[in-house]
């Protein structure tokens, strides 16, 4: 599919998704929000895609929600009933949350490659990715607090599962910028790089490694990791047993065993 706000390329089982509104600092207007969800739902349903790299065109990664879209909320003032007005606003927020959640629900691992600014909704987005990499000059900012808002699309819910709570609190209360080196030190990003080119080369190497594995096993691993994040060890072990009882014996398992015996690279179907 062709999108207005994103560039999507698929090569060797890797989908590279790039924010493509560089003249607007890759901010997300209403159409971009709709397309972001479509992109990840479509890639989830595309068998040949095994891993996704999320990057950006232009000087920055993502400046978050387009301010014009925020101002457009004023149209709700036309609703005279306060109850119905709040119901519409809640529906809008839930819809935007669903867009971010589509990244997390996508069964393929998503690797975020961040350069420049990652602000507001951009932090919501990278928090829903499986892995994050950044350049030295990249910075992350929970900007909503400076706009008189509470971040409402997933940052406050997902970030404490990734980095220490105290750091999350500081970022959320102050809105300060956190640059690449600090982001790596606290575990928000896996690695930091001097240049965008070096970062993309490394991220693509990781993506190629993942794409070479059993797609069925990669999808199952993501399912288990997300489930474990939100459940007790006992519940997660029980789910793991049920999962492997159904998925353990597969063509991928046989292919991996055969490759190990022959010391060759295993080939897997999508």
Image (spheres, rainbow, N blue to C red):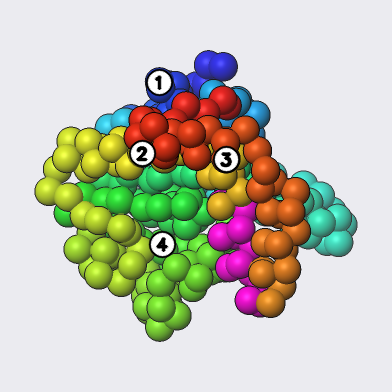
Residue under pointer 1: 11
- Tell me where residue 6 appears, x and y as whole percent: 46, 27
* Residue visible at 52% across and 28% down in the picture: 268
How many discs mark residues in the rendered view? 4
Quadrant of res 196 = top left
Task: Where is residue 90? Give x, y as percent.
Answer: 74, 57
Q: Which residue is drawn at 25% across and 70% down?
A: 185
Q: Does the magenta portion include 161? A: no
Instruction: Give the numbered dot on residue 143.
Output: 4
Residues at marks 4 and 1, CA–CA distance in whole angstroms:
35 Å
Q: Which of marks 2 and 1 is in front?
A: 2
Question: In the rendered image, which residue does mark 2 sit on?
Answer: 209
Q: CA separation, marks 2 and 1?
A: 14 Å
Mark 3 lies on residue: 253
Is 5 situated above or below 148? above
Q: Which of 255 and 41 is in front in this view?
A: 255
């Amino acid at each position: 599919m062709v999108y207005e706000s994103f560039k999507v390329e698929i090569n060797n089982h890797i989908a590279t998704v790039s924010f493509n509104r560089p003249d607007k600092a890759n901010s997300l207007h209403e159409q971009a929000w709709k397309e972001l969800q479509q992109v990840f739902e479509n890639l989830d349903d595309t068998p040949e895609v095994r891993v996704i790299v999320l990057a950006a065109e232009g000087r920055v990664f993502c400046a978050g929600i387009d301010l014009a879209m925020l101002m457009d909320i004023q149209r709700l003032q036309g609703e005279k009933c306060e109850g119905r007005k709040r119901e519409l606003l809640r529906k809008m927020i839930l819809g935007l949350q669903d867009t971010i959640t589509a990244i997390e629900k996508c069964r393929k691992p998503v690797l975020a490659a961040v350069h420049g600014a990652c602000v507001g909704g951009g932090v919501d987005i990278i928090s829903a990715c499986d892995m994050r990499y950044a350049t030295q000059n990249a910075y992350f900012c929970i900007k909503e607090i400076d706009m008189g808002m509470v971040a409402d699309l997933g940052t406050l819910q997902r970030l404490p599962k990734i980095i220490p709570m105290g750091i999350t609190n500081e970022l959320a209360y102050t809105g300060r910028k956190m640059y690449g080196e600090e982001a790596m030190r606290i575990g928000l990003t896996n690695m930091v790089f001097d240049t965008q080119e070096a970062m993309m080369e490394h991220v693509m190497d990781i993506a190629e490694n993942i794409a070479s594995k059993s797609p069925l096993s990669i999808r199952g691993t993501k399912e288990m990791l997300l489930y474990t994040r939100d459940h007790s060890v006992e519940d997660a072990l029980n789910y793991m047993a049920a999962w492997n009882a159904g998925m353990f014996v597969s063509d991928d398992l046989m292919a991996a065993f055969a490759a190990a015996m022959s010391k060759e690279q295993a080939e897997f179907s999508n």
